[in-house]
Image: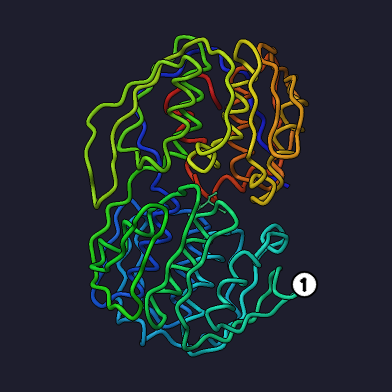
């Protein structure tokens, strides 16, 4: 098992970083590039394990995809060119590949088998197989199609009007992608807005999609045209350095070209609410997505309550927000975040367990956690639970712990941030 010994930081953090490309946008760029006709060029692609699974899945269906580090070229030949793979498709650890791909496979006249690693095999897939079956796909697997491996026989789909029972962009996107391949107009109603990269990128590939109130409509059987995609930096990766800059005394960091899509910026609102010193500069729009540079400085924090509509806007940032809360003055309450239990690991249990081992005063609730701030963190041996975001949260916690932190099982960080430790080294002076 991989193990990393992390010593407390004896200096402050300073300098500039360009964080890796956005994971959600990278997946979608490969998907739309593969469905479109023509040559799609993607730059600043996230060169992590999850996004490789999406590339490999479309390669298995015959799409020619060239990859040179963070530059991807997809030679799309349209939806009808996608062929039946000879082998089962390995989705690895990637929930986004699994859910979005199932939407696409449902609309193709072939048979597929998809499987994932241990963690993905525990995560619920019925949230997508239920609507996709309603559209006409045949999906079966363990527990009546709730768990991977799944067998899919796709084909001619009917449109549906679907109201998503879970606050999930993956579910919304799976139905929209199936809707793109289906007959007629498919609508998805979501009561709480989730990340809208699928909708934005579809327009970038020449597709038509509308939103009225909370109803999103997509016309089926549209053909898409290749596009150039410049992937913004991932705010969910930047989040770890936003936290580091805020927590380590004397620090000042600039994070460049970070995606600032309003459906993703909940952490910035929470940080501001907690009293952090943040500034956004050079704000602009690239490919329909807002981006900018974020300046962050050390500051003392106060506790807050995080609940309701903001939750999907910072769902992946809640582990690192919990660390911030452990150092804030007063109590922080996180509610309405039961979705955390269905991530790469049960993130409520993992965050509470790891932060408590490091000395935080934190307890789990059914749909969130309660953190009494102001604790000093100490060294300990802590495991990532095989979850990249838990691993990175622990690494940032180690910067302010009083003793050595031994992080076991750290290689999962490569899922979303392969150069995480190199970037951390770049902005600090005494890390080894
Ligand atoms: C994602 C949506 C979110 C998020 C995940 C990526 C996406 O998952 O946690 O990291 O790219 O659509 P849910 O849709 O399950 O909330």
Q: Residues within 10 Å of mark 1 (few under 14, many from 20)?
A: few
Placement of 303 over or under 205, stated as above or below: above
Left or right of residue 204: residue 45: right
Left or right of residue 394: residue 430: left
Task: Identify the residue position indicated by label 1 in the image.
Answer: 143
Q: Position of residue 397 (x, y in %)?
A: 62, 24
Q: How many marks?
A: 1
Q: Residue at the spot x=62%, y=28% of the render? A: 322
Which residue occupies the foreground of this view, 4 or 385? 385
Q: Position of residue 57 (x, y in %)?
A: 49, 73
Which residue occupies the foreground of this view, 240 or 192? 192
Left or right of residue 101: residue 404: right
Question: In the figure, residue 177 lies in which quadrant?
Answer: bottom left
On-image quarter of the C terminus? top right
What element does badge 1 sit on? helix
Placement of 346 over or under 79, stated as above or below: above
Q: Position of residue 143 (x, y in %)?
A: 77, 72
Q: Residue at the spot x=23%, y=43% of the render? A: 285
Q: Position of residue 238 (x, y in %)?
A: 44, 35
Left or right of residue 176: residue 355: right
Placement of 182 over or under 192, stated as above or below: below
């Amino acid at each position: 098992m991989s193990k990393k010994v992390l010593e407390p930081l004896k200096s402050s953090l300073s300098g500039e970083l360009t964080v890796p490309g956005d994971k959600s946008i990278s997946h979608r760029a490969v998907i739309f590039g593969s469905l479109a006709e023509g040559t799609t060029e993607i730059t600043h692609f996230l060169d992590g394990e999850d996004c490789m699974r999406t590339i490999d899945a479309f390669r298995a269906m015959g799409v020619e995809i060239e990859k040179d580090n963070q530059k991807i070229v997809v030679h799309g030949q349209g939806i009808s060119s996608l062929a039946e793979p000879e082998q089962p498709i390995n989705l690895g650890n990637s929930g986004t590949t699994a859910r979005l791909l199932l939407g696409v496979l449902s609309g193709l006249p072939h048979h597929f088998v998809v499987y994932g690693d241990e963690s993905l095999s525990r995560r619920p897939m019925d949230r997508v197989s239920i609507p996709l079956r309603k559209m006409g796909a045949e999906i079966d697997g363990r527990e009546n199609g709730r768990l991977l491996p799944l067998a899919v026989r796709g084909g001619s789909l009917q449109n549906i009007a679907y109201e998503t029972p879970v606050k999930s962009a993956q579910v919304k996107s799976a139905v929209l992608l199936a809707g793109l391949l289906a007959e007629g107009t498919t609508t998805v109603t979501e009561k709480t807005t989730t990340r809208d990269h699928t909708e934005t990128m579809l327009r970038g590939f020449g597709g038509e999609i509308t939103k009225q109130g909370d109803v999103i409509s997509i016309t089926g059987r549209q053909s898409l045209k290749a596009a150039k995609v410049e992937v913004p930096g991932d705010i969910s990766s930047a989040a770890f350095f936003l936290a580091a800059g805020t927590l380590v005394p004397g620090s000042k960091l600039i994070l460049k070209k970070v995606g600032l899509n309003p459906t993703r910026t909940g952490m910035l609102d929470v940080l501001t609410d907690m009293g952090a010193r943040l500034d956004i500069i050079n704000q602009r729009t690239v490919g329909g997505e807002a981006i900018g540079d974020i300046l962050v400085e050390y500051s003392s924090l106060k506790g807050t309550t995080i609940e309701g509509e903001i939750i999907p806007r910072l769902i992946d940032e809640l582990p690192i927000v919990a660390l911030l809360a452990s150092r804030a003055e007063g109590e922080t309450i996180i509610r309405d975040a039961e979705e955390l239990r269905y991530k790469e690991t049960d993130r409520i249990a993992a965050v509470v367990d790891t932060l408590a081992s490091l000395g935080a005063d934190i307890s789990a609730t059914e749909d969130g956690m309660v953190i009494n701030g102001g604790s000093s963190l100490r060294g300990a041996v802590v495991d990532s639970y095989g979850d990249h975001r838990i691993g990175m949260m622990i690494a940032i916690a180690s910067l302010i712990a009083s003793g050595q932190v031994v992080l076991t099982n750290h290689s999962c960080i490569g899922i979303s941030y392969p150069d995480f430790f190199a970037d951390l080294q770049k902005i600090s002076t005494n890390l080894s």
